[in-house]
Image (tube, rainbow, N blue to C red):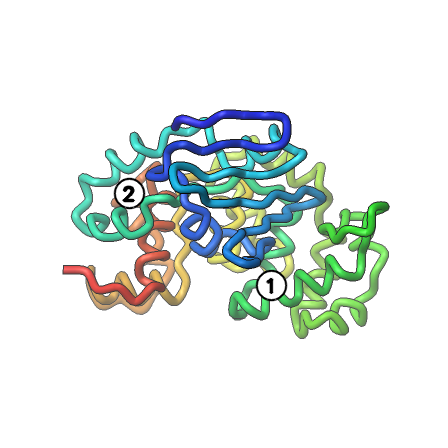
Amino acid sequence: MKYEKLDDRIIIFDKKQFNPKHILECGQIFCYRLNNDVYEVFPQNNFCKIVEKPDCYEILTKQVSYFENFFDLKTDYDLIKKSLSSFKILEEPLKFGYGIRILKQNLFETLISFIISANNNIKRIKLILNNLRSFFKNENGGEFFPTYDQFLSKDIEFYKKIGCGYRAGYIYKVLRQISPSLLENWSTLETSQLRNKLISLAGVGPKVADCILLFGYGKKDVFPVDTWIYQMYNQFYSKLENREQIRKNLVLEFGTLSGYAQQYLFYFQRSGEKTQ
């Protein structure tokens, strides 16, 4: 993909491989907002604005190298989409979500965010996470995702007060099961072993584990199955209630491209667009 790095921005010239709406609204991230047609993205203690110009997108930021990696700009999505185009089920989703890119997110933030996401809607997930950020301020007065130690210093009641509900107990417990360094150490494990490790944690079921594997660990041989993927499978494949079997079937079909396929199919299915 053609792009240029400057001191205060990244200029994306290839709009077919980068679309902020597709990237940020395909279910993989919650730390963003749309402000007067400008997307603001704030993972961890970082910040950027994405501005559309007639012939490019500009990522405005002081943390150019961070966001080059975060948006995975060095990966050629034309090659990925070419490989996926051999699957007929993806014909329309690839056209619809042409600008999707899977982000490289922080493991700890991904773990906490997707525990909060369980049985929740995106509006409420973002509200809870924004409540967290609002409570903790950095030295410049900006909002940022709390550190592990800051999370650890709070009791269950704090997490209830910011809106976590029953998930407050899960967060309190999982903080005592893991650490950021432990999560990093697990990255050397094979996907199946790592999945079992994650499912053993408080508040992490199969779907949440697969989301953490895909969006945190960058494992592409996983296929998170939520309500939208469940509906898609029953509509276009066969009637099947067992979501674990649906997951296995889809990973068997798409292999190491599973994570990419999931994002295009999820985004398309949730949009309500009709396929032929």
Where in the figure is residue 122, as x and y percent of width and height?
A: 52, 65
Residue type indicated by callout 2: Phe
The quarter of the picture where the C terminus appears is bottom left
Where in the figure is residue 60, as x and y percent of width and height?
A: 59, 39
Between circles 2 and 1, the one closer to the viewer is: 1
Q: Residue at x 65, y 44 (%)?
A: 47
Q: Which residue is mark 1?
A: 126
Within 10 Å of the Cα at label 2, are there few (<14), some (14-19), or many (20+) other Cα atoms? some
Residue 71: give its label: none
Please indicate, yes or no, whether residue 162 appears anywhere in the rendered image.
yes
Examine the rendered structure and indicate whether residue 131 appears above or below residue 211. Answer: below
Q: Residue furthest front?
A: 54
252 and 51: which one is in front? 51
Q: Residue furthest left?
A: 276
Examine the rendered structure and indicate whether residue 15 appears above or below residue 231. Answer: above
Residue 254: give its label: 2
Q: Residue at x 63, y 37 (%)?
A: 61
Examine the rendered structure and indicate whether residue 128 appears above or below residue 142. Answer: below
Please indicate, yes or no, whether residue 249 appears anywhere in the rendered image.
no
Where in the figure is residue 242, as x and y percent of width and height?
A: 34, 65
